[in-house]
Image (tube, rainbow, N blue to C red):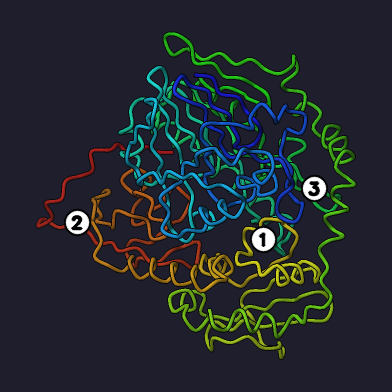
Amino acid sequence: MRVTSIGHAGFFIETAAGTILCDPWVNPAYFASWFPFPDNSKLDWDAYRDPDYLYVSHLHHDHFDPEFLRTGVSHTTTVLLPDYQTPELENSLRELGFTNFITVPNSEPVTLDGGLRIMIVALVSPSDGPIGDSALAIDDGTARLLNQNDAKPIDLDVVRSFGDYDVQFLQFSGANWWPLVYDLPESAKVAFGRSKRENGLARAYRYVEEINARYVVPSAGPAAFLDDDLMQYNDIDNSPSNPFPDHPVFLDYLREKERNNGLLMVPGSVLAITTGNAAEVTHPDDHPMAPYQDKALYLQSYAERVRQRLEKEKAAWPAPQVNILPEIKKRFEPLLKIADHISTGVGAQLLMEIGDTDQIVVDFIDREVRPWNGEKCRYRFRFDRTLIERLIADDEGDWVNSLFLSLRFGASRIGPYNEFVYTFFKCLSPERMTYAERWYAQQEDEVEEIQLGDWMVQRKCPHRQADLSYFGEVTGDRLRCSMHGYEFDLSTGRCLNASDRPIKARKVTAADSVPVPTHEVPED
């Protein structure tokens, strides 16, 4: 088996039973804020044009690049489709011209024609990607790999049931706007940034421990921020408070944990899994570390190469004919009427300050959109007017997968993080909102309990359903889910660091006969 890195989370996988092109990303994403890092524009993209199979893990635009998929990949290829509960990924690919699909049943091994065995683990929480994320396992009889990309699987028994892995590819770096865009004292930003970086590295390492592949390849991040307004977000000097660490940082992190099986791959690097399941990496030149050793100079040169493209993108954003307040009111209010769980979860007013003229309140209590009259709002966003004009003109139904990930906004809030705020902006269509509401309703059903220390707790974390028998850590009457760093007071169930759903927990009694989980729960 040979695997060629094509940048970020993209790989071209060659096996005796066929080739698979995974998540090719070439064009800037999120209002031209994200560019592939290191630069992958010099690759011979024609070499990857005719794969036997195409796998697009999810709809985030650093994985789903519609411009490239429209012209850069043969539409006769067969798409390996995650078994999502909404048809958006399939519909989007059909609109680009793809017609051949194999929907792979969720978490079930499937053998394709020619003998290639695969499994796709699809995650379907409203918080997973743009309502969906996935990981791909591949076995060609000579080697077995897990392309985990951004996905954070919650049932690790299922992932491991595919067999022992030779190589694991996984995300280790941040892909979020917290705390960078928030109005915070610099000292607070540093503290929160340090925590986010540490949690991200620790979470990736936890997956490395649990999967225990022979080799680990950090992938799926970070991006390059090349606009002058965003250049500050790159981790130029390996800052402990920057949430976007580079690939060598995670390789060093692994070595600190006495794991010396990490491999660096840059665009054009080829990984060959050879006889005896040894792995050899061949780089496209003699200096694979060059993008990291003088990153400031590398990014400055990169920015100059894309400057005209960036300016062209910016020139296309304004749509001054859009009347913002009535358009937002027309789009948001019908969704607020059906967003029972989300509106209750937010339970406050949100102020959108758009340019210098529009101040609009989204009221999740009264379920309405109206001009701001000076009332106190728990959540506040500041947006450039041209970005909102473009979202409305394009009838964009997912502002997370366009605006928020761009980092081109400002934010403040009173109180902790609230998942429901961003879920609302991810679900700006009746189909998505209906799905999200149905998913939240299903979580209210009876839940399975497990024992952690002196407590019986629900097995799945209320935040994103992580399996607490793997990710739960109990100290006294406090539980921490290491998947995303959420903490709960077990005596009350209250989430301590976010406005999230409470956890169901109770003290162990003599009548409890539920055994302690067989999984070891690693300590920090």
Residue 404: mark: 1
Per the model, the C-alpha gap separating discs 2 and 1 is: 43 Å
Task: Give the number of the disc on residue 508.
Answer: 2
Q: Which is in the foreground here, disc 3 or disc 2?
A: 3
Please indicate whether residue 475 sits to the left or right of residue 42 in the image. left
Considering only vertical position in the picture, is 177 above or below 25? Answer: below
Question: Could you say where residue 128 lies in the image, as x and y percent from the top left?
Answer: 49, 54
* Residue 144 rendering spot, x and y as whole percentages: 41, 24
Of helix, strand and loop, which one carries label 1? Answer: helix
For marks 2 and 1 on the same chain, the one whose residue lies earlier in the sequence: 1
Residue 241, quarter of picture: top right
Q: Residue at x 47, y 58 (%)?
A: 87
Going 54% across and 19% down the picture, which residue do you hit? 2
Q: Which mark is residue 280?
A: none
Where is the C terminus found, in terms of image quarters? top left
User: Is residue 23 shown above or below 412?
Assistant: above
Q: Going from the N terminus, do you reach mark 3 or mark 1 first?
A: 3
* Crowd tier of the residue under label 3, counting other residues whose Cα lies within 10 Å: few below 14, some 14–19, many 20 or above: few
Question: Along the line of sight, which residue is nearer the eye, 225 or 252?
Answer: 225
**Which SS class for mark 3?**
helix
- In front: mark 3 or mark 1? 1
The residue where tag 3 is placed is 232
Which residue: 39% across, 44% down? 104
Q: Quadrant of residue 502?
A: bottom left
Nearer the observer, 204 or 300: 300
- Of the two numbered discs 3 and 2 on the same chain, state the one appearing first in sequence: 3
Local packing at callout 1 (Cα closer than 10 Å; few below 14, some 14-19, many 20+) is: many
Furthest residue to the top?
275
Query: Where is residue 119 drawn, in percent x and y?
Result: 38, 37
Q: Say what amino acid the circle numbered 1 marks.
A: Phe
Nearer to me, 207 or 253: 207
